[in-house]
Structures are given as C-alpha cells and as structure tokens.
C-alpha cells in the first residue's frame, strides 16, 4: 500500500459520526437489537419480521456451495457465457439442480407491473445523466464506506482486479437502466440471476479463508444496504437537486428496483412498497452498517483513479473526481473514504452543479432533447464499459477462488 493510501487510512480512521449527506443522524456503530421495520410496508405486505442481518439465501447458497465442491463451476460459466437475453432458454448441459433453480429464479414476481417497467425505461431515457452519476460514482463511494461490503469485495476474487470487478458490477447497473431492461430482448433478468449466483459463491468462499473473522457475508440486510445506496440515494439526491419528477415516474423508478431486488434474491418481505417505506428502512439500516475501514479507503483510491483515468490530464482529473465524489456523498462519507478536500474544485462543483441541473431541466421539455440526451448518455456508458474491459468481452461469472493474496 502506498504512503498516500496509508495516510488516507489514518485520516479516515476516526471519522465516525452523522451521515449528513443521507439525512441520517444516528451513529454508524449504533446497534438495533431487533427489526423494527414492519413487513406490512413491504411489497409482500406481510412476513415473519425476522432480522435480515441473520437471513441469507437458503435456496441459492447450498446449491452454489455444492457446485463449487463438485467442481462444476468452470463448465457452468462456459455454458452461461452466451446466455444473454431475458427470453433466451437456459443452455443445455447445465446441472439439473442448477437448471431447476434458475428456471424459478428468472421468473418475474407476480406483482411485477409491465406498465411501470416501461415507464421506468422512459424515465431513464431523460434522466440517465443523473442516474449514471449517482448510481456509478455516488453508489460506488457509498459502497466503500460500508465495512461489510468493502471487506467482502476486497478479499473476494474481484478485489484483486477492480477494473474487472467494476465492469461486472456495471453490467448489472447498465442492464437495469437500459430501455429494454425487462423486455424479452433485454438482459436485466439474466444479469440479476447471475449476480445472485455470484453472491452465493462469495458467501461460501469467504468462509473458507482461515483469517476471515466476519461471519457469513452478504446477508439480506447487507443487500438492502447496497440497494439503498442506489435507488433510494439517487431519488433523494434528485429531489434535493430539484429535478422535476412526476408521481408516475417516481413510482416506476422504484418499481424497476423492486423487481430487481426480488431477482437478486432479496425476500419480498424486506423490499419496500413505497418511497416512504424505503426512506424509513434506509434510515434504519445505513447508520448501523456504515463507517471507515482500511479496505474501504484502499478501494476508494482505486475507484477514483479509474474514474480519473477516463479523462485527462490526470493532474486535473483526479482532484476533480475527488471534488465530485465529495459533493455527491457529503463530507462524512468522503472523510471515511480518505478522499482529500480540494480547495479549488470543491466550491466550484458545489456552485456549478445546481446551475447545470437547472439548465439541463430547462431543455428536457424541448422536442427531441430526451432522445438526444439518451444518445449522449448511452455513448458515455459504452465508453465506460470499453475503458473498464479494454475492449474485451466481459461477463458476470461465478468465482471459484478468493483474492489470491
């Protein structure tokens, strides 16, 4: 680890307190002894009320552990490489137990609303710039300030090659935001089911590490925490920026993430039914799951370096990326992550971004502007994927090992 990284870790080590950027006031180490969030507020409308910290994926976990122990994963990855479309049959040759699971796992929930999913696609078309920024940079910075997630990423196979790890995470994120996300020719179902299998593999593999002291990773609560750093965080920030969002668009954006949560293996009794319920759940789970770690600081440094490399010159782009990240997630999370303050760029971003939002929103109602905005946003997404993958085809695959070091 570089001297700069060590210094950032020391700076962030004592940075515990309030999550002002997220509207949260409870301390990061607060302990909640039960699960006060009611399943009546979920898409299921009922449930056991079990604390999600102690619930994992009872269907996928034993299955994937068995695949790993049987040595089936390399062949499964080969067979699933060309499984890309929502309407595509599963490839021949998959183990029977895996095929049965995947056929069930790929089905949309009974409460999925095709109309809302189409409305969400239209919403993404005009708001893609904000969503890509908030889910990509903002969500990435928040994820490294979640100790359980930062450690799981750092010590799993993906932690050894963060460009590949970010590329594979982006595959799912871009699939969710695509215009055809849940249409037959889309890929959101495929990428969500593959990600569910990856999570099960990471749970199994990290427990095999002799020095892993953190129990079973990626609980239902851990997945909820990550979920709230994406749609809940994005919606709160867009409202803070005074982006005009209709009730129909707001409900549709929530819905596409509700369906995705279900496909990722989050139980319906934990998936919020409304934004009010989502905000309440976020305010419960984020404070007790966020804070600084050496792993989070190291990962943040890598992520911001990657972001800076996409622009030039580097002497300008890294400070600008630091300021942008701090603006998105706030001082508390930025300090936890060891992001340095930028005396020139920080105030500039704070003043310029609201003006940019007002300018952009003034243009959105004009003819053809949403289509043009989507083309530009799509070009940016494609460039990001090309940069991360170095132009090589990349797919979400089930790991068989942890971080080599």
Image (cartoon, rainbow, N blue to C red):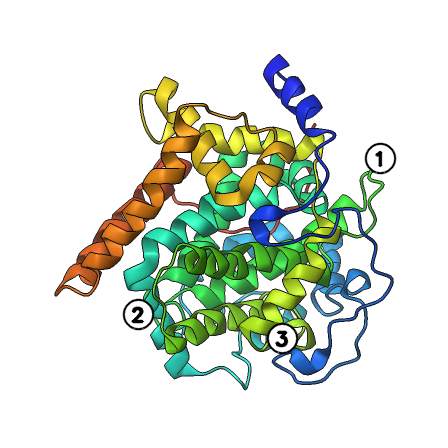
| Residue wearing tag 2 | 122
Tag 2, which secondary structure?
helix
Going 41% across and 37% down the picture, which residue do you hit?
388
Which mark is first along the chain, 3 or 2?
3
Residue density around tag 3, few if under 14, some if 14–19, many if 20 or more, within 10 Å: few
Residue density around tag 2, few if under 14, some if 14–19, many if 20 or more, within 10 Å: many
Q: Nearer the viewer, residue 211 or 93?
A: 211
Going 37% across and 43% down the picture, which residue do you hit?
385
The image quadrant that residue 284 belongs to is: bottom right
| Residue wearing tag 3 | 100
Q: Quadrant of the C terminus?
A: top right
Q: Is residue 30 left or right of residue 8?
A: right
Q: Nearer the viewer, residue 155 or 149?
A: 149
Is the Cβ of the residue at disc 2 closer than 8 Å to that at disc 3?
Answer: no
Which mark is first along the chain, 1 or 3?
3
Report the mark closest to the observer, 2 or 3.
2
Looking at the picture, how far across and down is residue 305, in whole percent?
A: 47, 27
- Determine the residue located farthest toward the top in the rendered image: 3
User: Could you give the CA–CA distance between mark 2 and mark 1, rounded to whole angstroms?
Assistant: 47 Å
Tag 1, which secondary structure?
loop
User: Could you give the CA–CA distance between mark 3 and mark 1, rounded to whole angstroms?
Assistant: 35 Å
Q: Nearer the viewer, residue 195 or 151?
A: 151
User: Could you give the CA–CA distance between mark 2 and mark 3, rounded to whole angstroms?
Assistant: 34 Å
- Mark carried by residue 211: 1
């Amino acid at each position: 680890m570089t001297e700069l990284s060590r210094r950032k870790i020391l700076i962030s080590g004592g940075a515990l307190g309030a999550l002002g950027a997220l509207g949260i006031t409870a301390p990061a180490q607060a302990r909640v002894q039960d699960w006060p969030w009611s399943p009546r507020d979920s898409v299921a409308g009922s449930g056991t009320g079990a604390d999600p910290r102690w619930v994992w994926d009872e269907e996928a976990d034993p299955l994937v552990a068995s695949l790993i122990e049987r040595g089936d994963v390399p062949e499964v990855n080969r067979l699933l490489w060309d499984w890309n479309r929502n309407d595509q049959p599963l490839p021949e040759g998959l183990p029977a137990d895996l095929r049965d699971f995947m056929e069930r796992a790929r089905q949309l929930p009974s409460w999925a609303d095709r109309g809302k999913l189409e409305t969400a696609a239209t919403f993404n078309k005009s708001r893609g710039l904000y969503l890509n920024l908030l889910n990509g940079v903002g969500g990435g910075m928040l994820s490294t300030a979640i100790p359980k997630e930062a450690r799981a990423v750092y010590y799993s196979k993906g932690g050894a090659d963060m460009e590949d790890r970010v590329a594979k995470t982006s595959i799912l994120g871009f699939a969710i935001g695509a215009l055809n996300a849940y249409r037959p020719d889309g890929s959101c179902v495929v990428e969500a089911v593959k990600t569910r299998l990856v999570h099960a593999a990471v749970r199994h593999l990290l427990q095999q590490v002799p020095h892993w002291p953190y129990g079973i990773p990626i609980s239902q609560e851990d997945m909820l925490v990550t979920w709230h750093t994406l749609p809940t965080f994005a919606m709160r920030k867009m409202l803070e920026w005074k982006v005009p969002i209709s009730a129909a668009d707001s409900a549709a954006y929530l819905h596409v993430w509700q369906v995705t949560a279900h496909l990722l293996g989050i139980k319906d009794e934990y998936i919020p039914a409304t934004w009010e319920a989502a905000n309440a759940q976020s305010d419960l789970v984020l404070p007790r799951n966020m804070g600084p770690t050496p792993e989070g600081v190291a990962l943040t440094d890598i992520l911001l370096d990657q972001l800076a490399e996409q622009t030039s010159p580097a002497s300008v782009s890294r400070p600008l990326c630091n300021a942008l990240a701090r603006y998105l997630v706030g001082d508390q999370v930025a300090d936890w992550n060891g992001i340095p303050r930028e005396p020139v760029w920080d105030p500039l971003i704070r003043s310029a971004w609201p003006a940019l939002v007002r300018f952009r929103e003034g243009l959105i109602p004009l003819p053809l502007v949403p289509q043009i905005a989507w083309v530009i946003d799509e070009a940016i997404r494609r460039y990001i994927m090309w940069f991360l993958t170095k132009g090589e085809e990349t797919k979400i695959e089930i790991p068989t090992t942890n971080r080599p070091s």
